[in-house]
Amino acid sequence: MIKKGVVLIFVFISSYGYAQQKEARSFNLEEAISFAIDSNYTAINARRDIAIAIKQKWETTAAGLPQINGTISYNNNLKQPVTLLPAEITGGPTGTFTPVTFGTKQNGSAVATLDQLIFDGSYLVGLKAAKTFLKYSENLLEKTNLEIRKGVINAYGSVILSKELVLIFEKNKVNLEKNLFETRKIFENGLAEEESVEQLEITLLQIDTQLNNVRRTYSIAKQMFNVSLGIDVSEVVVFEDSFDELTTQNIRLDLLDKALNIEENIDYKIALNYTQQRDLEMQLEKSKFLPSLNAFANYGTAANSNTFSFFNEEQIWYQSSIIGLSLKVPVYSSGMRRAKTQKAEIALEKAETDLELAIQNIMLELNTSKSNYQFAIDKYQNAKKNIALAERIENKNQTKFIEGLASSFDLRQAQTQLYTFQQEYFQSMLDVINAKSNLETVLNTPQLTNN
């Protein structure tokens, strides 16, 4: 009995822990955007790119700072090289040679070398390039955040659109099943034609197919939303915003009159970064015409012995040291340096043209986004009116059909029209939300700074 109690307690604790672990997350749209900017997979790697750029900047800077390297070497001449000397040096016969070995069998040395760059034009350009690359990485993160924001808005809207469609199709199905049931009864009593039943059956089959498809779409939309946030696709998420509230919040006519500061547009910033990089590449090639100057100093010690006695106190170590300068002067490269400089100049001219093209494309994108946003608002307002009219038409045909004043074909046509306008209405709501998001991305509003 005691063992059973322990098992039940363990099961309860495990179940409670599992329930806590699987507790549903809850987001409104702004909370979802903030969460995604922090946790989205692409955003995480974009921040890592900035960390890499920071290290790259220090790596470039450190190249011009003192560099100290140490070398320790040990040699054991298992077979010492032999040198032949004329024999007459040692009193031997002329024309013969005496084999002689020089040095000791073993030797060791330790040397420390200090190198210091004094002047190198390419180093100065490299420092500027490292800063530009860091700024480029920061701009890429900003663009990533803007794209994540737009993606989350689209994914959030797609989920609540699918949810609304599921609810409306379920409601339509219930109403159709009721109509079909009543019409069958009337037909069985001989007061209606079989075609009326068949028309309703066709409509019900279509609604049932669409409902099943929307349910699958709803499930996929939720998984896509989870991916955009950077969480597991199986996690349960509660969406706090209603579709009507979200659409109303995203109708801001003042955005249509807002002017663009081109310098705030992220695509302009990235195109400008690209131009700056090409300019630095040209400066780098020009710097190769300049001399470079380096200083060095080293200190070393060496010992020689026929046995391994380098750690003995009696071992003699001989010191050595040297300081010096190294001046490298470019003299002649058969026109190679000049060709590289000219190639870099052409690349810079191309980048400047691309920058101008980027400006024009941004202005075009701004005007297109404003037009699409205005159209989305107009379409939403019209869809709102159309659905009200379609509901009234469907209700009238429903009444006429029951009273025998309208055919089943007329009723089905009115129902199909209503279902079409329902889908258009909800889609127009999502279009308003997405169109505003696209316009805000061009305007870089709100500005999403680095985390």
Image: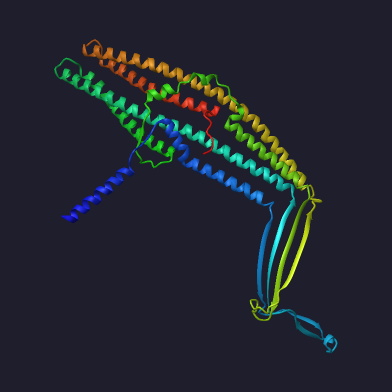
Q: In this view, does 251 lie above or below 226?
A: above
Residue 162 appears anywhere in the view: yes
- The residue depicted at 31 percent of the width and 24 percent of the height is 168
Image coordinates for residue 317, horizontal then vertical, percent: 70, 74
Q: Nearer the viewer, residue 254 or 386?
A: 254
Q: Nearer the viewer, residue 279 or 127?
A: 127
In which quadrant of the rendered view does residue 100 lie? bottom right
**On the rendered structure, is 260 left or right of 16?**
right
In which quadrant of the rendered view does residue 342 lie? top right
**On the rendered structure, is 443 left or right of 351?**
left
- The residue depicted at 65 percent of the width and 49 percent of the height is 60
Q: Nearer the viewer, residue 108 or 144?
A: 108
Q: In which quarter of the image is the N terminus?
A: bottom left
Image coordinates for residue 427, horizontal then vertical, percent: 40, 24
Image coordinates for residue 146, horizontal then vertical, percent: 51, 33
In which quadrant of the rendered view does residue 112 lie? bottom right
**On the rendered structure, is 151 left or right of 77?**
left
